Each structure stands twice: as C-alpha cells, then as structure tokens.
Image: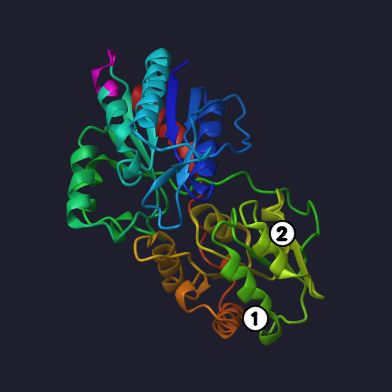
Amino acid sequence: MKRVFFYAQHLLGIGHLRRAATLALALAEGGFDVLLVSGGAPVPLDLGRARLHQLPPLRARDDGLRELARIDGGPFDDGFRESRTRELLALFAAEKPAILITEQFPFGRTQLRFELMPLLEAARAMTPRPLIVSSVRDVVRRSASPQRVAETVDIFSAFDLALIHGDPKLVPFGDSFAAWDRIAPRATYTGYVAPDAPSPGASDIGKGEVIVSVGGGAVGAPLLKAAIAARPKSKLADRNWRLLVGDNLPGAERARLGGADGIVVEPARRDFTTLLSNATLSISQAGYNTVIETLRFADRAVLVPFATPRETEQSDRARLLADRGFVATTPAETLTADSLADAIDRALAGPSIRSLPPCDSSGGATTVALLRARLA
C-alpha cells in the first residue's frame, strides 16, 4: 500500500484542514496509507482509515495573517521553529512515503518556509524520491507581489504536480495567479473537494428558512450583526432566520446577538448541507468549503466575502460567481443592513442555483485517480 504524507496548516479558520481531511479520507478509501500532518489548532476530524499526527500547533496572530503565534502562548522563536522542524523531518523520514502533498504551499503558507523548505529538500534527497504534489484551492492571494509570484514559480520547479481543487468553468486559477502560464504544464484541475451529499428527504429542518453561516466564526461577527439588522428590511422578514455562529466566535460577540423573535442563534451544525437544501436562502462568507456546499445544495445565496487589503481570495471567488449569475454579493467593507437587504432582494430575483449548470465536485475521486495514474 503506497504511503501519502499530507502536510496541512490552518491559521485562522478551519477550512484548509477540512478540505485536507476530506482528501485524506478519499485517498485512504482509495487504497493509500495516508498520514495527515496538521500544524494548526487540534480539530475533531473524520479521517476514516487515514492517520493523524498533530504538530505543536500554530495559528495566525490576528486576521491579518502576517504573523504566527503558538496556541499555548509560548514564544514563537528560533528554538520552537527548530524543534518543530526536527519533529516534522523525523516523521517524514520514518514514513518514507511514495507521495508528499503540501496543502497550499508554495502558493501560500509562506510563513511556514522555515519547515517546508527543509521538508521539500528532504523529499528531493530521498531514495526512491517521492512524487511531490501541491494541493491548492481554486483561488490564491491576488495581492501577492511580482517578487512573491516569481518565488512561487521558482519553488514550484521542485514539484511534480499541482492539483487545483476547483472548476475552471467557474473560477479559473489564472484569474488570481499571475504566472499561470508558467505552471500550467504541471497543473491539473480536479474539481471541487466536497463531502458526500445528504440523503434526499432526510429531514425537513430549516424548511423555508434563511440560513446565515460564518464557518468557524473567527471573523463572522459583522455579518451576523448585519443579518439581524437586515431581516426586517428584506423580503424574507416573515421567515425564520437561523444564525450558525461557529465555534471560534468570541463569547462576548455571541452574547450581543441576543435572541429576537424569528431568529435562532446556535453553534455550527453537522447537518449544514441539509439546512442548505431546505432553506429559501443562504447568507454566508465566501470561504472554499462553504461556497462549494452552497453551489451543491442551496437554492439561492448571498455571499459577503471576508477581505483585507492582503487577503483577496474570498472577494475574488464571490466576484467570479456573481459575474456568472450563481449568487448575489455585497462587499464586507461596505456591509450594512441596507446593503445586505438589497443583496437578498437581488438573489431572490435571480435564478435558482439549481437551475444552472452544476459545478464539478468530484475533487476527491479525481485526486485519487490522478495520483494512482502518476505512480503507475
């Protein structure tokens, strides 16, 4: 059984780890012996037969995502970096994998170069040399400097393959990565990576509701507050609105949401896709996992992308999908009750997502098939 060493690091939300876990599960079910190595905060995961190794965890110091910090509050210094790198390299040497996968690197996670570059060097020096693969989402940070883009291309020269987990008919990778033509010969689209669909008619919960979700919730408070204020201004003021706050929303922010009539405030739910299937409208940010679930299961949707001058991923994804008529959107930086109510009305006036051509969501199975073929 061929071994896969899959490195993943989530810094703020848990979307990167969720996608990596879905891929690890698919690879394990496809006959690979998979070790998922996680460098972020511990999160409960369904990995099936795949294994998990937790590195001493790191996170982003704030939503700027520029600096790293230890979860335990200890110093993020040279000693910590060297210790974590030694642990990672020893684990890699013991595994002797046939495939090394780095989630997002070198198209992101540059803060982790202190351990990823030595890992890449170890893979290139190993005999037999493993297949070296980058697993990257549909959109990368468009605000990267020309120097950073050139560095990415240079590092990618050591990789055999980039697996782009998206659908080019909806979101072309070259729209956000300026040097697409230089990596395209060794890049392959897999389709979106998505969990299994819910059973039809499994539950009526959420029927006719408005579902407001913010993923893990770390940066979701402004959208939740705007949704509460937009409800009486929208054409869906008579519906039940269900706000899913996520585990990472600060307690003080959750307390401020209150519990007005017609509004349910509760943690994120495992049956989220069932809620989407039954809802009249979804309102969410534009993270990878939420968007693919919205495209697969929702009737109509409004996207309010999280954005900073540095982080352009969600804004680009939302813009491209809105341009193609799948969703309505409103920028987070100008979010108000009125602008959100207007976006809701536009979404209701537009076509149902279900009436549009479906996106490619075969990312898990396609990844398994592509890696099998490359090893063969």
**Colouring rule applied to residues:** rainbow
Q: Residues within 10 Å of mark 2 (few under 14, many from 20)?
A: many
Q: Is residue 60 magenta?
A: no
Residue ID at (49%, 76%): 330
**For residue 66, above or below residue 125:** below
Q: Nearer the viewer, residue 283 or 258?
A: 258
Q: Which residue is mark 2?
A: 275
Task: Say if residue 300 shows up in the picture.
Answer: no
The foreground one among 107 and 223 is 223
User: Element under label 1?
Assistant: helix
Residue 236 shown left or right of residue 17 in the figure:
right
Return the residue nearer the eye: 176 or 305. Answer: 305
**Location of the C terminus (image quadrant):** top left
Residue 88, x across and y down, in percent: 40, 24
Residue 228 in view of the camera: yes
Magenta segment: does it hold 125? yes
Occupied quadrant, residue 100: top left
In the structure shown, which secondary structural element does the residue marked by tag 2 occupy? Answer: helix
Q: Which mark is residue 291?
A: none
Q: Amino acid at mark 2?
A: Leu
Residue 285 location, x and y as percent?
A: 54, 64
The segment highlighted magenta reads 122-128
Q: Position of residue 218 (x, y in %)?
A: 56, 56
Q: Is residue 87 above or below residue 248?
A: above
Q: Which residue is mark 1?
A: 230
Label 1 crowding class (10 Å Cα cut-off): few <14, some 14-19, many 20+?
many
Q: Earlier in the sequence, mark 2 or mark 1?
A: 1
